[in-house]
Image (tube, helix red, strand yellow):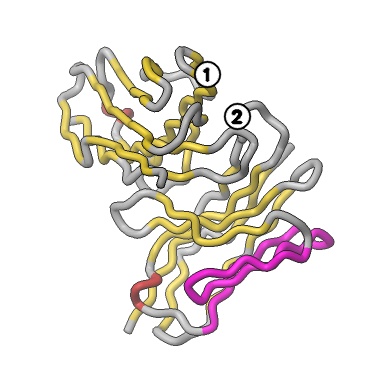
Amino acid sequence: GNSVTQMEGPVTLSEEAFLTINCTYTATGYPSLFWYVQYPGEGLQLLLKATKADDKGSNKGFEATYRKETTSFHLEKGSVQVSDSAVYFCALSGLGTSYDKVIFGPGTSLSVIP
Amino acid sequence: SQTIHQWPATLVQPVGSPLSLECTVEGTSNPNLYWYRQAAGRGLQLLFYSIGIGQISSEVPQNLSASRPQDRQFILSSKKLLLSDSGFYLCAWSVPGASGYTFGSGTRLTVV
């Protein structure tokens, strides 16, 4: 079936460190891929997305590339800040259901320390 | 522009009491609407979705129900809350046929 797998963490990094959060997916067809971010006590916000193979989504210094050959959509940032501390969810959609079904990964908690 | 409103932000309710959480969307017509629950330290669980007025589908059996009395209004209810209903409830909407959701700010429900 359709699913999303991501490292659950928690991930703890020092400020200005390089961040990678791995995400792989299983899906039939050609899904769209997303990263959502959830800051403490808040709802989810769309961080970036990619709708077809080799597309790169980017926002706020974060990047992820849609890799169809490896079914991956890893999130990266070159230099993290304390304000990036949050939970990050990888997700996919475009599965052809009547209600735009989105499948979320379990989330990765990131803590950035000064 | 489209916005989504969800309230209340926090709620503390005793076991056995009723529940009503409301979500409204502005700036769009005929959206798909969703209720998710996020238990402490866990991922997102889709509870209900709706593709139109009065059309509600449940993803998991539970103590909760949902209603859509108007095109852009989605309500999550319970007649008698259980301790296990505690969690963070998120409403979301999407444009039919488009990809991705927009989430509300969530309601933190604690059942005591």
Residue B99: x and y in percent read 61, 44
In front: label 2 or label 1: 2
Decide if residue A97 is on the left or right side of residue B46: right
Residue position for label 1: B57
Note whether residue B26 is visible. yes
Residue B61: x and y in percent read 48, 18
Q: Which residues are magenta?
A: A54-78
Judge by depth and name the residue closer to the eye, A10 or B108.
B108
Q: Residues within 10 Å of mark 2 (few under 14, many from 20)?
A: many
Residue position for label 2: A99
CB contact under 8 Å: marks 2 and 1: yes
Judge by depth and name the residue closer to the eye, B11 or A9.
B11
The outermost residue toward the right is A69
Residue under the image location 46 percent in, 45 percent down: B102
Judge by depth and name the residue closer to the eye, B8 or B42.
B8
Which amino acid is tagged 2?
Tyr
